[in-house]
Amino acid sequence: MGIGPGGREEITPRAERALKGAEAVVGYSLYIDLLDGDLLTGKEVYRSGMHGEVERCRLAVDLARSGKRVAVVSGGDPGVYGMAGPVLEVLGDEELEVEIVPGVTAATAAAACLGAPLNHDFAVISLSDLLTPWPVIEKRLASAAHGDFITVLYNPKSQKRREHFRRAVAIFLEHRPPGTPAGVVKNAGRPGQASVVTDLERLLDLEADVDMLTTVIIGNSQTRVTGGRMVTPRGYVL
């Protein structure tokens, strides 16, 4: 199940019902900590750190096999870089009842902070190469840039991985004018939310503020800034 960006108001009623009906909750520590206490009252709570995804899935499946109703928590949407895929892979062909509860993604939460930049075809690309080789990511960036997709960058920069964000910006500058609107959103839907509308040429000026809690959106050839907000026209005659 997806809890959205993290704020209680962005947890869907369906997700809240799933949480309240669960006997056990399994998730990454950060996402568990984002949940209000009343949603976890009286439940078995299992949390672990980064890189414990497979172990969490196996634990959740074992708990479900024992007859418990289990909620596996993902930030955003569980099917977008989330836990739905690993859970289903662990299950394989086993016939165990599974419900996928969607949630608000970082892409849409960040877009709402900036205006309406995703109002046409867009691509979402994670710059993390922990599970995807960098050459593959670079190829996808070039394809999205060449194809004039509005592009959302997840995981743009970490403490150890700094050059990928710079390379991504360089790739887009090969295909789009430097004045192409772009936006940076930090902590979308969480305390400390902050957003900046800028352009492709000046995107690296904000590099110091970009980290794993940041979402970057690069507009396409039609995206413009109106009233300080990014807007990508859908094509309606106004």
Image (cartoon, rainbow, N blue to C red):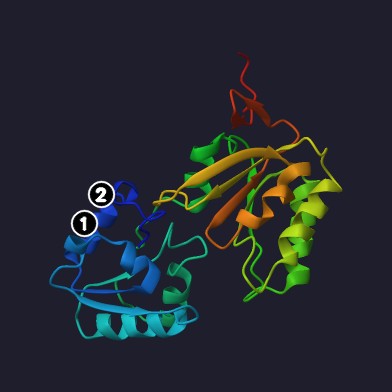
Above or below 40: residue 11: above
Dot 2 crowding, Cα within 10 Å, few <14, some 14–19, many 20+: few
In the picture, the disc for residue 116 is none
Image coordinates for residue 39, horizontal then vertical, percent: 20, 62
* Callout 2 amino acid: Pro
Image coordinates for residue 184, horizontal then vertical, percent: 60, 46
Q: SS of the residue at dot 1?
A: helix
Residue for point 32% across, 68% down: 32
Q: Of residues 26 and 99, which is closer to you in this image?
A: 26
Residue sitting at the far left: 42
Residue for point 64% across, 31% down: 232
Residue for point 23% across, 63% down: 19
Above or below 164: residue 26: below
Image coordinates for residue 114, horizontal then vertical, percent: 55, 37
Above or below 67: residue 164: above
Residue sitting at the far top: 238
Image coordinates for residue 223, horizontal then vertical, percent: 68, 32
Q: Which residue is mark 1?
A: 17
Q: SS of the residue at dot 2?
A: helix
Dot 1 crowding, Cα within 10 Å, few <14, some 14–19, many 20+: few
Asked if residue 148 shows in the view, the reply is no
Q: Are marks 1 and 2 in contact (CB under 8 Å)?
A: yes
Q: Which residue is mark 2?
A: 13
Q: Of residues 53 and 65, which is closer to you in this image?
A: 53
Question: In which quadrant of the rendered view does residue 98 lie?
Answer: bottom left
Q: Quadrant of the C terminus?
A: top right
Q: Quadrant of the N terminus?
A: bottom left
Asked if residue 188 shows in the view, the reply is yes
Total marks shown come to: 2
Residue for point 50% across, 45% down: 194
- Say whether residue 110 is left or right of residue 11: right
